[in-house]
Amino acid sequence: MYEEKEPKAKKQITKVKHEKKFFHKTNKKDEKVKETTPKKEKKTKKILSFKADYVSVLVRFAMFLLVAFVVIFIVTKIRNGSDARTFTNNMEEMKEVAEVYYKVDTHRPLSVNEEVMMTLGDMEDASLIKELKDKDDNICSKEYSYVSLEKQSAKNYELTVYLSCGGESEMATYPLIYETENTDGILYELTRTITKDEKYSCPEGYLLSGRYCVRYDSTKTEAAKPVYRVIPEKNTAARYKPSGYEYEYVDPIITETANVYDCPSGYTLNGTVCIKEGTVKYRTQTDYTCPNGATPSGSRCLYTTRASYSDEKPYCKRGTLLGNDTCYVTKEYSVRCVTGRKDSTLNACYTTYSASQELSDWLFDGKVTYSDSYDISRLENEKRMYEVDEYLDNGRVRYNRYIRKYIKVCDDGDELSGSTCRHYDEAYETRYCPSDYHLSSDQSECYTYEDAYYRETTGTYTCPEGYSKRGSGSNTSCYKYEKATAHETKTPYCSSSYDLTSDNKCIRSVTATLKEDDALYTCPSGYTKRGSGSNTTCYKKTTTDSYYYCSSSNATLEGTRCITKGSTTFRGYSCPIGYDNVGSSCVKTNVTERILAEETNGSSTETETIWSKEKDLEGWTWTGNTKEAE
């Protein structure tokens, strides 16, 4: 904590050493002069030489300090500039990678107010980006750093980039526009039952908020924003197993000298062979078939058709196109205040009241040191307290000092302005629109309808409902996939060392042991013999082929690459600031009273329902219902 400085004596000693070297060089010169110069002249020359060298050393030392200062200043500037660019470059690299990844329709959210996200670790695992480090060579957090994309309208999106490295973090948002070729998206209704631990309870008429119960006189509810975590497809190099060797063993050939044979326990003698019957196993294989006109593709059927051609396209000069002939035009509503004052900036109405005062949380106020025998409690009160930081070697104690201050506060959700609180409430206002506009049913905007315009185009190709488009120009075609019909077949097989017979039995055969000691044991052609008598072993060395394989059981080998399919996981719901998350809704209340909640140890269950573009999410069950994405 304290910086240890070098003692002055040490610096002086270092300086003296330099001076001794200087004098040493000067004395050598004087020795040469001493041989040819009289005594009086020698003394004068020695003094003059000393003065000239001393001034030279001072000048050189001053020049050295100046050059060192300039070099340090330039290096510091360059390094600081480089450090500042490092964090910005990392943010920009994540942004560029995300922009390219989300250009694919299936990677983006289908519904308005839906969000998908990827962690930095997901991006690295999928080889979308290399490992990021900050200016101090710290690895950026793979778990907390992420990119997310939220759909705000038909083609407008908002990209968020959050980066955390070495205790420093930064977030930035960017508006993006993506033109979607295929707007036919299907959403699946999923449900699950969850158990909640009820740690606190409230009286009737109150709403639980953390450890408090609040009573309210109005609520505002809106749909929560579903958030999904998308893990991209992972494409890595497969591992290579080079060719090698293995040994093949067979039973030796026995030339009989007697007809008495023996079998191991569990075997039955059949001539000169011992037979043991095992359990038949079955391997299930699934084949898929498709109707006429469809092409099998794995477990799906591929349908193709020609795209239809059009040389005229509807468009809107303003607003959003509905169908092929109507434009939906919106405008912000105006507000009249029934109660309170109007805030023209926010286009809302508010009332005011005086802020209340309360003590803040404990704040760190520095470190102090007292004797070990000093009673520190004499200094403590409701606004000051001390905490032991370290016991020093000199018998004193260092303390962390904390203080509390009086601060101005408002009720939850209200805005503090000096010593006055502003309470905004939609109940204070009346919303209206211009004469040629209508107020929407949820009073969120003014709207009107206009006829669409048409313009000549170079020609566009469209597909029937349910089909996707691929190719371009005259090569455009339409396709869709449907589930193929599965046919299961069971094939019998046996465990290793057993053979399957024609009547589906597993038989293991070994050569019976000839009881006579003078039996002759030999090996088949091409095999090498090892041992003798009943201990004879016959073997040969064979070469195995090289091959590629995947170390992960979740990966599929495709040539020399291992492909791990991506997945989408529902993370939960997100609400705006000032709203509480209740299931799939966001609730905002006008609190009129707050009391402490009562502690309990109970639990409750509730059912959650979401609409997802993925039919199979871990922990969720599809209800069978579907709908088109907005």
Image (cartoon, rainbow, N blue to C red):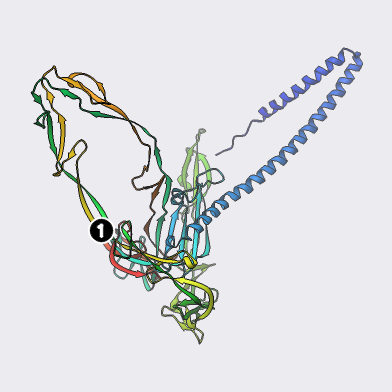
Coordinates of residue 593 in the picture (x, y in percent): 38, 69
- Would you call the spot at circle 1 few (<14 residues within 10 Å), some (14-19), or many (20 or more)? few
Q: Is residue 500 above or below residue 58?
A: below
Q: Is residue 578 visible?
A: no
Residue at the front extreme?
A: 525
Q: Is residue 4 above or below residue 110?
A: above
Q: Nearer the viewer, residue 573 or 285?
A: 285
Q: Is residue 447 visible?
A: yes
Q: Nearer the viewer, residue 511 or 353?
A: 511
Q: Secondary structure at mark 1?
A: strand
Residue 500, by quadrant, is top left
Q: In the rendered image, which residue does mark 1 sit on?
A: 486
Q: Is residue 192 above or below residue 280?
A: below
Residue 345, by quadrant, is bottom right
In-image side of 88 versus 529 (left or right): right
Residue drawn at x 63%, y 45% as measured from the top left = 79
Residue at the top extreme?
A: 35
Amino acid type assigned to the residue bearing label 1 in the image: Ala
Residue 264, by quadrant, is top left
